[in-house]
Image: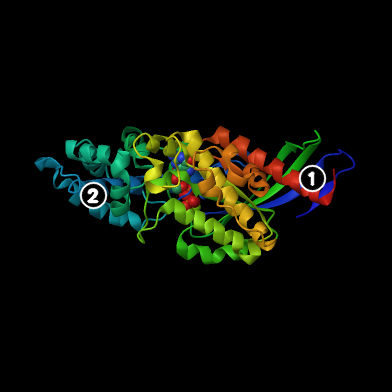
C-alpha cells in the first residue's frame, strides 16, 4: 500500500487493496457490483445482454424446480398444465449452451412459462417455499434461489422483446463466481481530523464455493483489508454435510484469521442479508439453531449477538499470541446486548467497529458503508504511519 500527500492540493492520497472473501452465495459479488455502480460507469450493454440470458435461464430453471417441488408439498399442477414442463426442459438445455448473442426464448415458451407460473399448484408450491419454516428444506433439496420471486413476479416485463435488465435486476441475479474479478476506483473521504483524502481502491472478488477457496491465498499479497462477508439469512439453513450454514461461515472466518497470509491483515466483517434475516425471524426462532442465544427474536438483538460472536473470533488470535485465556464471546452475549459481555474483553470491544450489518442489494446503504470502510482503513493506516 502506498501513501502520498500532494503539495499542490494538500489532498492526501492513499492506495488500498481490498479482498472480498466469504462462503458461497453470501453477497460478495453483489457488493462488487455496487462498487461498479457507485464508482465506475456502471453496467455496460454487454453486461445487460449477459444478464438477460441469465435471467431467462433462472426463470426456466426455477419453474422446473417448482414443478418438481409440488410433490414435496402435496400439491398438483392442473391436468391441462402437466405437459408444460416437458416443453420448457429442452428450451433450457439449448439455453445452457448459448453464447452472448443467444436470442430470447421462443414466444411459445413464454406462453408455457406464464401458464405454469399461474397454475394454482405452482403458486401453492411457491407460497410454501416463501414460508420460512419450509423454505430451507425446499431450497436445500431443490436449490431454488432466494431471488426466485423477484424475477418470477415480473414475468410481464421480462418476457418483452425489448427487455433490458435494470441495475436492480443485475444486483438480484445469482451467478456463482468462478474467475476472480478486479476493480479499481477513486473515492473521496474526510479523515477524522477533517482533512480531505482521495482513496485509490483496488478490490478483488473471488469465488466462495469450497473448490474456489484454494485460490484465496493467491490474492493475499499487499492486501490492506479483507472484507469478509457472512450471510445472516442462513442462520436456519443446513448444508449437505448437515452443518449449519452460518456456523460454517463463522468457522471459515476463523480459518481465514488463522491462515498465515491473512494473519496480519485487518479483517472487516459484513453481516449481510439483514433484510432476509428480518423476514425469516418472523417465522423462525434463532435459538432453535443457535441455542446459546437467549434474547428476543428481534433483528437488532440478533445482529448484535452475531457482532459479538464475530468480534470474539477476530480478537481470538491476538489473545492466543499473548497466551491469554479466550473468552467465549458468543455465549457471553446470548441476550443480544454486547454491553453485557462477561469480562467485557477490550479486544472484543475493539473489534466491534470492524463489524457492519449490511443489505448488499441496497445501493444507497452500500455507498455509505463502502465510504465508512474506506475512511476507517485510511484512518488506521494513517495512525500506523503516524501521518496525522
Ligand atoms: N435480499 C438480499 N439479497 C442479497 C443480498 N446480498 C446478496 N443478495 C443476493 O444473493 C445472491 C448471491 O449473491 P452473490 O453476490 O452472487 O454471492 P457471492 O458471495 O458472490 O457467491 P459466490 O460467487 O458463489 O461465492 C444474489 O441473488 C444476490 O442478489 C442482500 O443483502 N439481500
Ligand atoms: Mg460471487
What percent of the width, then of the height, locates residue 296? 44, 34
Q: Secondary structure at mark 1?
A: strand
- Of the 4 image quadrants, the one containing the C terminus is top right
Towards the viewer: 302 or 44: 302
- Camera sees residue 34: yes
Query: Which residue position holds label 1?
Result: 13
Residue shown at 52%/60% (left/top)?
A: 179
Numbered circles on residues, count: 2
Q: Which residue is mark 2?
A: 88
Residue 288: x and y in percent read 37, 45
Q: Residue at x 64, y 66 (%)?
A: 260
Is residue 32 in view from this perspective?
A: no
Label 1 lies in ligand 2 vicinity (Cβ under 8 Å): no
Q: Crowdedness of circle 1 by 10 Å Cα count: few (<14), some, many (20+)?
A: many
Question: Which quadrant is home to the N terminus?
Answer: bottom right
Judge whether 324 appears above or below 303 on screen. Answer: below
Colour convention: rainbow
Q: Mark 1 or mark 2: which comes first in sequence?
A: 1
Residue 261 rendering spot, x and y as whole percentages: 65, 64
Amino acid at each position: 500500500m502506498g501513501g502520498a500527500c500532494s503539495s499542490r492540493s494538500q489532498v492526501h492520497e492513499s492506495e488500498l487493496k481490498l479482498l472480498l472473501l466469504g462462503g458461497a452465495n453470501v453477497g460478495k459479488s453483489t457488493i462488487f457490483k455496487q462498487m461498479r455502480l457507485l464508482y465506475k460507469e456502471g453496467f455496460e450493454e454487454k453486461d445487460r445482454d449477459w444478464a438477460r440470458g441469465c435471467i431467462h435461464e433462472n426463470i426456466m430453471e426455477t419453474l422446473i424446480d417448482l414443478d418438481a417441488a409440488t410433490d414435496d408439498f402435496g400439491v398438483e399442477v392442473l391436468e391441462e398444465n402437466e405437459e408444460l414442463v416437458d416443453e420448457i426442459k429442452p428450451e433450457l438445455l439449448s439455453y445452457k449452451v448459448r453464447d452472448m448473442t443467444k436470442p430470447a426464448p421462443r414466444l411459445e415458451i413464454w406462453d408455457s412459462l406464464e401458464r405454469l407460473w399461474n397454475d394454482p399448484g405452482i403458486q401453492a408450491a411457491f407460497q410454501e417455499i416463501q414460508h420460512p419454516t419450509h423454505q430451507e428444506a425446499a431450497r436445500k433439496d431443490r436449490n431454488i434461489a432466494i431471488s426466485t420471486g423477484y424475477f418470477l413476479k415480473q414475468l410481464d416485463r421480462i418476457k418483452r422483446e425489448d427487455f433490458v435488465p435494470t441495475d436492480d435486476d443485475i444486483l438480484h441475479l445469482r451467478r456463482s463466481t468462478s474467475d476472480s474479478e478486479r476493480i479499481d476506483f477513486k473515492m473521496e473521504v474526510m479523515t477524522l481530523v477533517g482533512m480531505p483524502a482521495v482513496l485509490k481502491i483496488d478490490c478483488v472478488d473471488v469465488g466462495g464455493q469450497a473448490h474456489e477457496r484454494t485460490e484465496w491465498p493467491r490474492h493475499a499479497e499487499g492486501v490492506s483489508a479483507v472484507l469478509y462477508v457472512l450471510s445472516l439469512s442462513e442462520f436456519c439453513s443446513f448444508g449437505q454435510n448437515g452443518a449449519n450454514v452460518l456456523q460454517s461461515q463463522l468457522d471459515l472466518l476463523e480459518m481465514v484469521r488463522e491462515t498465515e497470509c491473512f494473519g496480519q491483515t485487518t479483517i472487516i466483517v459484513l453481516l449481510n442479508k439483514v433484510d432476509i434475516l428480518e423476514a425469516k425471524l418472523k417465522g423462525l426462532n434463532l435459538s432453535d439453531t443457535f441455542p446459546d442465544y437467549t434474547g428476543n427474536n428481534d433483528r437488532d438483538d440478533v445482529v448484535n449477538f452475531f457482532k459479538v460472536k464475530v468480534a470474539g473470533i477476530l480478537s481470538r488470535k491476538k489473545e492466543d499470541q499473548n497466551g491469554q485465556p479466550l473468552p467465549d464471546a458468543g455465549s457471553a452475549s446470548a441476550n443480544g446486548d454486547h454491553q453485557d459481555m462477561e469480562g467485557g474483553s477490550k479486544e472484543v470491544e475493539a473489534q466491534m467497529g470492524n463489524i457492519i450489518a449490511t443489505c448488499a442489494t441496497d445501493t444507497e446503504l452500500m455507498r455509505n458503508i463502502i465510504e465508512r470502510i474506506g475512511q476507517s482503513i485510511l484512518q488506521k493506516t494513517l495512525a500506523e504511519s503516524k501521518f496525522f
